[in-house]
Amino acid sequence: MITNKIRSLVVELLKPVGEIYSNVASDESLNYITYRLNQSDRYPNRYDYSLLIDLFFDSIEVVEDKCDEIIELLNYKQHNNDEVALTFYFESRGIMTDMDRDIHVRSLRFHIIAYERR
């Protein structure tokens, strides 16, 4: 299934930026990144996804630097492996609030156009 192939490449790309979790992190974690993939049916015969990345860090400077790093890594870039070719387009950057005021949370959204390599 192409979704698992996309997840695998997304994790590989984001691992150098920080600790990565799909959807939810463990309870003891701080200073981590979560991601979610949502498939779109906008265009037939093409795999389109939204990649939602949330960053949770205890330093405002670190969370902003990590956002910049991810945007630089992905935006308008194509990343390939033996199974998929992904092109990323940055859509938005938002501030989220956490119940713990010492945790700074940012949310990034990318559009992905994916092609399965055969």
Image (spheres, grey):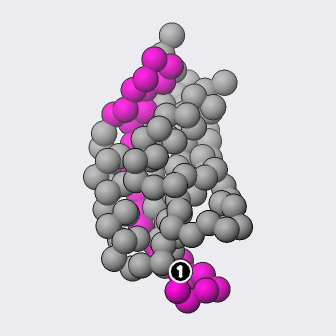
Q: Residue 75: where, in percent of width, then height? A: 32, 48
Q: Residue 15: where, in percent of width, then height? A: 46, 46
- Would residue 88 be counted in the magenta stretch? yes
Which SS class for mark 1?
loop
Q: In this view, does 62 lie above or below 81?
A: below
Q: Is residue 40 above or below residue 66?
A: above
Q: How many labels does the image show?
A: 1
- Would residue 43 be counted in the magenta stretch? no
Query: In percent of the image, x 34 and y 77: which residue is there?
Result: 61
Q: Residue 6: where, in percent of width, then height? A: 54, 33
- The residue at which mark 1 appears reads as 103
Image-quadrant location for residue 86: top left
Does the rendering let one see residue 112? no
Return the residue found at the far front.
28
* Main SS, magenta residues: strand
Query: In percent of the image, x 54 and y 48: which residue is there?
Result: 50
Query: In percent of the image, x 34 and y 34: which residue is there?
Result: 78
Please name whichever residue, 12 or 85, is drawn nearer the observer in this view of the structure: 12
Locate residue 71 relative to residue 41 in the image: left or right: left
Q: Is residue 94 above or below residue 9?
A: below
Does the rendering let one see residue 16? yes
Q: Residue 49: where, in percent of width, then height? A: 55, 42
Please name whichever residue, 91 or 66, is drawn nearer the observer in this view of the structure: 66
Please name whichever residue, 68 or 111, is drawn nearer the observer in this view of the structure: 68
In the image, which residues are magenta?
A: 78-103
Return the residue found at the far top.
118
Locate residue 91 relative to residue 20 in the image: left or right: left
Give the position of the N terminus as an image quadrant. Answer: top right
Image-quadrant location for residue 101: bottom right
Amino acid type for the residue under numbered disc 1: Ile
